[in-house]
Amino acid sequence: MSLERYLKTLNTAFRSHDGSTMARLLSASAADSSSSGVVAYLDEREIEKECPRRLKGALATVAAGVLRSWHASHEGRADDAHKHYIAALESFLDGIYVPEGIWVAPCLYGMVAGVRKLAKKADWGGPDGRKAAAPSYGEAEAEEEGSKSMVLTTHTIMRAFRLSINDRSNDPITSRKACALHLAIDMFKHYGDLKNLRMCNNIRGVLEQHWTVVEPMSSRADWVSYRYYVGVLKISEDKYKDAEVDLEAALRHCHNKARGNKRRILNKLVPLRLRLGLYPTLDLLVKYDLAHFHDFAVAIRTGDVRSFNELMTQWERVFISKGTYLLMEKCLMLVYRNLVKKIVVVTQTFKLPLRVVQFAFQRMEHERDVDEIECLLANLIFRNLVKGYLSHKAKFLVMASTTEKAFPKIRLVA
């Protein structure tokens, strides 16, 4: 496609309010826009000459920025590619999104996704910014650690979100509020890349203020995604029961054919339910290729410390990549609890000498001296996973008189 034809097609799409075609033509990648042939012949003088001549107003500025970004990417200048593309997005927000309204939403969504991709490539290297780790703290620290492009992108996407959520119109057909939820999800993803999930609460707080207006305007896909990310956020805040509600809602409303999305939700929901003492069926796990969680469920239910530790070692990298390692690690306390419960069932007494508990742990290849066993049991009592007290002098664990009282349901105390 020649530059002349590209600009003509873009102008036609704009005049006919074809947001999907505009999204393709203004993509962050020339290949995605089917305009790879344009890039090889681009130069700054041609861009400056042709864009204002064939396009009017803000569209000319946006197209010029996108073309400059393509040219920089073609020459391997990732920083310049991001700089030009984010300038194009800023011009798009001011000159097209605000005056034209939500028919350009597909283009806005595509450009936001594109600028995030270019920012990661500029700051962290690789095709999608995957060669280096993201920073772990706030924006100031991120900029110091070489994430300047990511920080600039944060401000731009936030601006798009504010332009949407602060629209005074509540008309479901014309209001920019219809774009707010999708942009909030983009912010959640972006803050996730920066390892800065706590900033998501600011977005969430603003959305909740307008929820009665925003929710009916939003697509089912965006609603499901939002519930998923809110659930993930609540897991990071140790609000497990609240997180379960959000993830269950996301799973229940997720499209039946969206198997990959359901599996993504279950990758968070299954560990969460294990932490709450709920065990998924094997049929469900097999259906979504998550059968390894069945082995964890068996180890937790039976108090098999050795098997649980072996499984954690085996699946450590997978859980870290999914962001569920710490959640699964917390299930170890439930394994300890259920091992103590098994000891009570075998010995038929609720007054256990610490040496008996120590022996049971040794059989599980979990060597601990008596003081460590006492500390572990004190932790179980503190977390209300076991009801009782420790006699330090006599070296005994004394529990409530019935199994129901000594080992309350995990869900009630989690």
Image (spheres, helix red, strand yellow):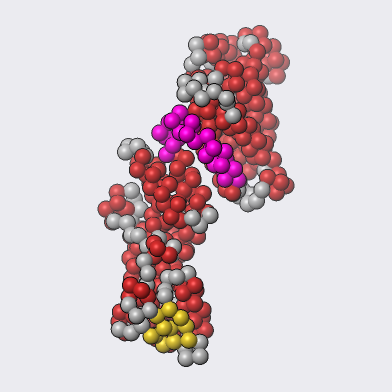
Splitting the image into 4 quarters, where does residue 119 fall?
top right
Q: Is residue 49 above or below residue 27?
A: above
* Residue beneath the point at 49% across and 72% down: 382
User: In which quadrant of the rendered image does the C terminus lie?
Assistant: bottom left
Q: Is residue 10 above or below residue 70?
A: above
Q: Is residue 321 visible?
A: no
Q: Is residue 31 above or below residue 150?
A: above
| Highlighted range, magenta | 199-224
Q: Residue furthest left?
A: 283
Left or right of residue 117: residue 245: left
* Residue beneath the point at 42% across and 74% down: 386
Which SS does the magenta portion mostly show? helix
Expressed as whole percent of the image width and height from the top left, the position of residue 369 reads 50, 84
Q: Residue furthest bottom?
A: 394
Magenta-span inclusion, residue 140: no
In front of the other: 338 or 387: 387
Q: Is residue 402 visible?
A: yes
Magenta-span inclusion, residue 208: yes
* Residue beneath the point at 68% across and 19% down: 43
Expressed as whole percent of the image width and height from the top left, the position of residue 159 reads 63, 31
Left or right of residue 30: residue 298: left
* Residue beneath the point at 35% across and 60% down: 278
Expressed as whole percent of the image width and height from the top left, the position of residue 143 reads 70, 44
